[in-house]
Image (tube, coloured by chain):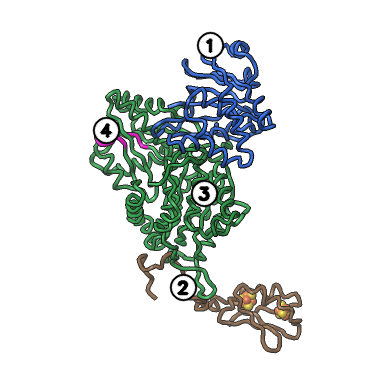
Amino acid sequence: MALKSWKELPIGCVVSDPGSASEYHTGSWRSQRPIWDNAKCIKCGICYVYCPEGCVQQTEDGFFKADLDYCKGCGICSHECWPRAIKMVEEE
Amino acid sequence: MGKRIGMEVAIAVAEAVGLCDIDMAAVYPITPQSHIAEHLSDLVANGEIDAEFVTVESEHSAMSAVIGASGAGARSFTATSSQGLMLMHELLPIASAMRLPICMAIANRAVSGPLNILNDHTDIMPQRDSGWISLFVENGQEAIDLSIQAFKIAEHKDVMLPVCVNIDGFQLTHMVEPFEMPSKEEVEKFLPPFVPHATLHPAKPVTMGAFAMSDYFTEIMKAKNEALKSSKKVILEVWDEWARLFGRAYKPVETYQAEDADVLMLTMGSMGETAQMAIDQLRAKGIKAGLVKLRLWRPFPLAEIKAVLKNVKKLIVTDRAISFGGPGGPVFSEIKSAMYAEARRPLIYNYIYGLGGRDVAVGEFVGMFDKVLADTKNEAADTYEFWGVRE
Amino acid sequence: MIEVRWHGRGGQGAVTSVELLAVSAIAAGKFAQGFPSFGPERRGAPVAAFTRVADKKINVRSGIYEPDVVLVLDSSLIGLINVTEGLKPDGKLIVNTPKSPEDIRKALDYKGTLALVDGTGIARKEMGVPIANTTMIGALLKVTGIMELDAMKEAIEHRFGRIAQKNLNAMKRAYDEIKIYN
Ligand code: SF4
Ligand code: SF4
């Protein structure tokens, strides 16, 4: 996409298309991915709360998983999960 | 022409703002602005104006609150002084970058330290580069008129920038003096409803104040600078309209006895009127002295300044602040840089004066002229001096 | 232009008086300024306040250093501060005191025009309070002729509501009772 000139900028640089951040696929930053071990998971939801990308989702059975389009592999979910149900593994 | 009434200027400013159909005000009281805060909150509490008065715990919060309210589409007002303005400093460029037409009255007061509550311009000068339109007044009438005009200028679709009106603390805010107050109907006719360029609303979400990296930052700075520069056109239109409606004309640079003057003095704010009396005394002695009053500080009126100064031999720039360790007073630096490339330019002298409420009487302005005229070898030109300092 | 300097103590109403006087003079068609000595407000501390009245627009905004009239609201200030400082040679000194002109002249080593009235005594009788700021406006108007006593009515009523009439009565008595010694 061509960058805009100063004359083409909206007043005050207001971003008028809501949710446009979803076009930004932070999953490409990932060098490690979180792997859930549901046998250890107590469904406390801490991983869901702490994920800075908001990409941890709850599945129908009540367990959690990351949307890998946005998961940037930061490891915060794994660090915060006190039953140690999330392991970070190297991306291939 | 309205009826002339007498009132304290700070109270009158609050009354004038009360005529402007504001939606919200967030004001943290600080001397010498307090009477503006108190009276405005009275007007809201008494139901005389239909606005939200947000009580805040600091000026940082006051500015944050008006930014939020203005972003939501509310006509928003605040007022401050000195340390309060310094505390707002961080947010001022954000308000202008988001192009929010907030209006602010500043009761100018010296910045600490040492603590001093009296008047000078050391509070507004550090805000110079914040992207706000910055206006100066020299009496109560101007304080009222510009407080009303500020909303029209700020909210014009080609401007959409915050405006501050600089009103000398105590010298003006605490003075009971005569002026005409426009009527509610006159202000209603003059000031159209606020139509924001965008609003924060859940029904149609937008992002204000988004992040921008080096690929866009330069373009955004350029756009903001152009917006501020081109606001002058609207400011002039608003002043024309005001002159037609109320018979009081305003200009970016105003003059008194300047046309044939050999030596001019430049002032900002309330000192202009006292300096004007000095001009009368000098003229009576046959000295061709004149006065230039800078009303529009930002956007800086380059063309007007050049036009006024092109034929004069000597110019005395008076500054009520200093750039420590720098080339002199901030106004002096700007005027010098404005005149640098001109083929004909005056010798420029700089007096730093009236700091922390130090009074300057008519005779002292005469003394400044005498001193500059006595400098026949032009030795003191291009330098600055603390006027009246004890050695 | 007439320039007046008021001397009082914080809380005695000197600032209110200069305000009422300026508002009334402007309503009467004159130009006026009323202002306090700038700075922090402290109850009981000596304070000064200033009035300028003229028939045309007043441009000067510096302080008043050579007043035409000095009005002393609280005579206990005499000896504490130099109340006649800068008073013009043909100026007038008004003092709120029950004392004799000889006593005041001696205390101040002052030979110019002197005007005395027991404003506090009047205020006590007319209003039941020993606060003479509005009372002394009557004295000032008599001595200077800045404007008619009636011109104060609207501002006093606006400011004092129910007790306005008492203030006006006290003001009138000071106007009638002040004695001028040349
Ligand atoms: S933090 Fe760990 S235990 Fe809690 S829900 Fe997430 S994975 Fe399960
Ligand atoms: S690794 Fe980071 S981004 Fe990915 S799911 Fe865990 S917390 Fe979210």
Q: Name the chain under label 2.
A: A
Mark sitting earlier along the chain (3/4): 3
Foreground label between 4 and 1: 1
Query: What colour is chain A?
Result: brown
Residue range highlighted in magenta: B256-266
For disc 2, the marked residue is A16
Q: Amino acid at mark 4?
A: Ala
Q: Are marks 2 and 1 on the same chain?
A: no
Mark 1 secondary-structure assignment: loop
Q: Nearer the viewer, residue A67 or C165?
A: C165
- Do discs 4 and 2 belong to a common subunit? no
In this view, the mark in front (2 or 1): 1
Spatial distance from mark 2 to mark 3, Cα to Cα? 35 Å
The circle on residue B169 is none
Specify the amino acid type for callout 1: Lys
Residue B265 among those drawn in magenta: yes
Question: Which chain appears green?
Answer: B
- In the picture of the structure, the residue carrying the numbered disc 4 is B261
Chain identifier matching the blue colour in the rendered picture: C
Whether residue A49 is situated above or below residue C75 in the rendered picture = below
Residue B391 in the figure: left or right of residue C107:
left
Q: Secondary structure at mark 2?
A: loop
Residue B225 shown in magenta: no
Element type at mark 4: loop
Q: For mark 3, what is the residue?
A: B14
> Does residue B274 lie above or below B73 as drawn?
above
Circle 2 Cα neighbour tier, 10 Å, few/some/many (<14 / 14–19 / ≥20): some
Q: Residue at x 54, y 14 (%)?
A: C181
The chain containing the residue under callout 4 comes to B
Between circles 1 and 3, the one closer to the viewer is 1
